[in-house]
Image: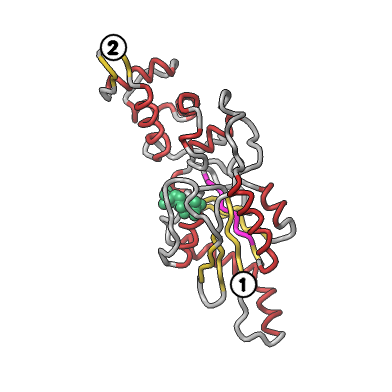
């Protein structure tokens, strides 16, 4: 993101507003669920946000989209899963019950007949917050989408008689750590493709796959060009017949198509923090 680094506004006004609204509602929240992307857990963790709105709350960290990731799960504090795996719901509800038990017991002792637990689900744009809540609630009430910026306001959803979850808009970092993080956030779709330097992002993905998933890359693209990105791009344009005229490649179109390929999960399961 070299040339564009200065011009990308990572933390636009609507995210400032959303953060403020989350801060206002934090008092009634018992537990925070932080959703991160299993393909890049560190880069998609927004601890800065949690420290700002609720440094003292209990946080359950969930690495979602596990079906797209080849991360080896060795951190017992993170629950790995996917909305495509039915048993994941039980795991999450069990963790919530375990954490909430003390509070529920004490409310029952005080004579509260139907104690309730309030959770706030937060994370970067497009990590799967709304899908996660729908999945846990077995509903399809919250709107989800393949692109960032769809959830615009805080919304409560009832999970069962005891648990309520609040969906929130995605919040990015105030400043991005480095150029590479920006590329990865684009490839896991937390950052909009349209605001990123497309050539640089796809070149990064090419180099990353060649270095870490070489045989899968060669198989998928049916190519032997593994040293030179531009040469690979030219071959790709030729194979896909993406030409502006007889001897000019349609680079823009090919970058768009490659972006879809690299995000799709069709090449192989991936871990950007290898
Ligand atoms: N492969 C896969 N896709 C998921 C999973 N969870 C969510 N998604 C997809 O991620 C995209 C973003 O989901 P959404 O719930 O709108 O994200 P939000 O912006 O964080 O609320 C949608 O296309 C979902 O279908 C998952 O576990 N696996
Ligand atoms: Mg959403």
Q: Quadrant of residue 153?
A: bottom right
Q: Name the residue under label 2.
A: 247
Q: In this view, does 104 lie above or below 229?
A: below
Name the quarter where the C terminus is drawn: top right
Please, is residue 29 above or below residue 53 in the view? below
Disc 2 is placed on an element classified as loop
Instruction: Find out whether residue 59 is within the magenta segment.
Output: no
The residue that mark 1 highlights is 117
Query: Residue 160 appears at what percent x and percent y?
Result: 51, 74
CA gap between label 1 and label 2 equals 64 Å
Query: In the rendered view, does 190 fall on the left or right side of 108?
Result: left
- Relative to residue 36, is residue 253 drawn left or right? left
Local secondary structure at mark 1: strand
Sort mark 1 into few (<14), some (14-19) or many (20+) by Cα contacts within 10 Å. Answer: some
Q: Where does the image place residue 182, in percent across and percent down from the top left?
A: 56, 34
User: Which quadrant is the N terminus positioned in?
Assistant: top right
Farthest residue in the top direction? 247
- Is 117 located above or below residue 247 in the figure? below
Can residue 128 be seen in this snapshot? no
Per the rendered image, the range of residues in magenta is 32-38
How many numbered callouts? Answer: 2
Q: Is residue 33 magenta?
A: yes
């Amino acid at each position: 993101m070299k040339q564009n680094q200065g011009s990308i506004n990572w933390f636009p006004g609507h995210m400032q507003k959303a953060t403020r609204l989350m801060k206002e509602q934090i008092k009634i929240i018992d537990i925070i669920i932080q959703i991160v992307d299993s393909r890049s857990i560190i880069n998609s963790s927004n601890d800065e946000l949690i420290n700002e709105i609720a440094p003292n709350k209990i946080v359950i960290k969930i690495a979602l989209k596990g079906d797209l990731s080849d991360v080896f799960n060795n951190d017992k504090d993170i629950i790995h899963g996917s909305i495509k795996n039915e048993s994941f719901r039980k795991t999450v509800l069990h963790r919530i019950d375990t954490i909430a038990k003390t509070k529920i017991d004490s409310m029952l002792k005080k004579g509260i007949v139907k104690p309730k637990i309030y959770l706030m689900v937060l994370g970067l744009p497009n990590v799967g917050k709304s899908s996660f809540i729908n999945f846990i609630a077995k509903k399809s009430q919250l709107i989800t989408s393949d692109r960032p910026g769809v959830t615009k306001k805080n919304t409560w959803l009832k999970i069962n008689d005891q648990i309520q979850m609040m969906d929130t808009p995605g919040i990015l970092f105030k400043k991005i750590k480095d150029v590479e993080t920006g590329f990865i956030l684009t490839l896991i779709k937390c950052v909009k493709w349209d605001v990123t330097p497309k050539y640089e992002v796809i070149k990064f993905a090419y180099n990353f796959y060649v270095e870490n998933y070489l045989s899968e890359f060669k198989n998928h693209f049916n190519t032997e060009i593994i040293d030179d990105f531009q040469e690979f791009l030219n071959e790709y344009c030729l194979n896909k017949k993406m030409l502006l005229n007889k001897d000019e490649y349609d680079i823009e179109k090919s970058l768009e198509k490659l972006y879809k390929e690299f995000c799709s999960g069709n090449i192989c399961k991936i871990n950007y923090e290898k």
